[in-house]
Image (tube, rainbow, N blue to C red):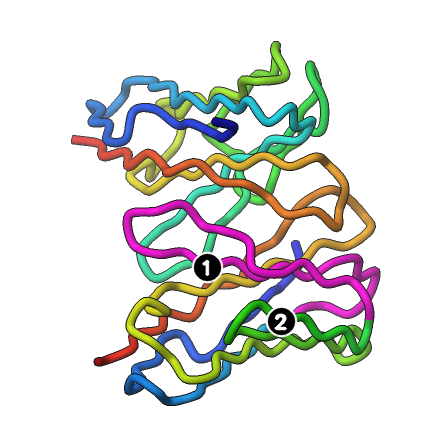
């Protein structure tokens, strides 16, 4: 069983604040790291899939970095908006099998 | 519209009964997955299937069974052997390549009464 951990578990920020959270995962046999956004009453939706050490990806105000050697990824949100409120999930898979192992998620609440 | 559909959205079951949760996708995906979420926890993998007529146990398969007779469908049966079946169940699908995203259904909330 892969051990994927996310911190913090929850986060309250004010509209306009920038924020970031962490995903740590086993670095051995690493293949890919996924980030998903899960809004209440909706399905989780993919933000990024990252495979290369040092990779950085960006989608609007959201960006992510990946360090496969030390086994962590950061998700950044610049200028948080109330519509960014959601649970952010990361998931890792290794090349031992086609299984995505999820972390516990970070629940972000942005106050207007 | 391509997507993945789970039904029903809410399900109530009497203790000791088996119940089957439906998951259908029209994305032509080879791989399908079932996850369970409990309050305050992340998604835990129950079963996954990489191709028709084949499936593998995930981390918490005990008390569950699946079938994959058609590419589009991956039903999950929660049996009476599952000690704590009340949870939120999510189905997902992907192309099967490790670096491609998974697509999720909207989930089924199962309550044992």
Q: Residue at x 64, y 47 (%)?
A: B101
Which residues are drawn in magenta? A24-52
Q: Position of residue B109 (x, y in %)?
A: 28, 37
SS at badge 2: strand
Q: Magenta stretch containing residue A30, yes or no?
A: yes
> Is residue A20 found inside the magenta-colored segment of the image?
no
Residue ID at (23%, 34%): B111
Please tell me which residue is depicted at 28% across the width and 87% down the height of the picture: A14
Quadrant in the rendering for residue B45: top right
Callout 2 crowding tier (Cα within 10 Å): few <14, some 14–19, many ≥20: some
Q: Chain of mark 1?
A: A
Residue B38 vertical position relative to residue B93 in the rendered view, above or below: below
Residues at discs 1 and 2 both on one chain? yes
Residue B76: x and y in percent read 46, 24
Q: Can you say which quadrant of the picture contains the C terminus of chain B?
A: top left
Between residue B69 and residue B46, name the one nearer to us.
B69
Q: In the rendered view, would you say A29 is above or below A85?
A: above
Comparing A24 with A57, the one in front is: A57
* Chain designation of label 2: A
Label at residue A58:
2
Q: Position of residue B34 (x, y in %)?
A: 51, 35
SS assignment at label 1: strand
The disc, 1 or 2, on the residue closer to the chain's N-terminal end is: 1
Residue A58 vertical placement versus B17 (above, below): below
Counting from the top left corner in percent of width and height, residue A22 is at 55, 78
Q: Which mark is residue A37?
A: 1
């Amino acid at each position: 069983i892969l051990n994927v951990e996310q911190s913090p578990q929850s986060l309250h920020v004010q509209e306009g604040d920038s924020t970031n959270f962490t995903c740590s995962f086993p670095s051995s046999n690493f293949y890919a790291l996924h980030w998903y956004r899960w809004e209440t009453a909706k399905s989780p939706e993919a933000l990024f899939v990252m495979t290369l050490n040092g990779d950085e990806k960006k989608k609007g105000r959201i960006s992510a970095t990946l360090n496969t050697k030390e086994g962590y990824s950061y998700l950044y949100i610049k200028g948080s908006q109330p519509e960014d409120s959601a649970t952010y999930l990361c998931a890792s898979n290794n090349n031992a099998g086609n299984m995505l192992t999820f972390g516990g998620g970070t629940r972000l609440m942005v106050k207007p | 519209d391509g997507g993945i559909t789970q039904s029903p959205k809410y399900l109530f079951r009497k203790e000791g009964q088996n119940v089957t949760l439906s998951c259908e996708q029209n994305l032509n995906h080879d791989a399908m997955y079932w996850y369970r979420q409990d309050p305050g926890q992340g998604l835990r993998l129950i079963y996954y299937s990489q191709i028709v007529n084949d499936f593998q146990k995930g981390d918490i398969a005990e008390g569950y069974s699946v079938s994959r007779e058609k590419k589009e469908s991956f039903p999950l049966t929660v049996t009476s052997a599952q000690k704590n079946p009340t949870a939120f169940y999510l189905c997902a699908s992907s192309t099967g390549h490790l670096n491609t995203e998974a697509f999720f259904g909207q989930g089924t909330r199962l309550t044992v009464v």
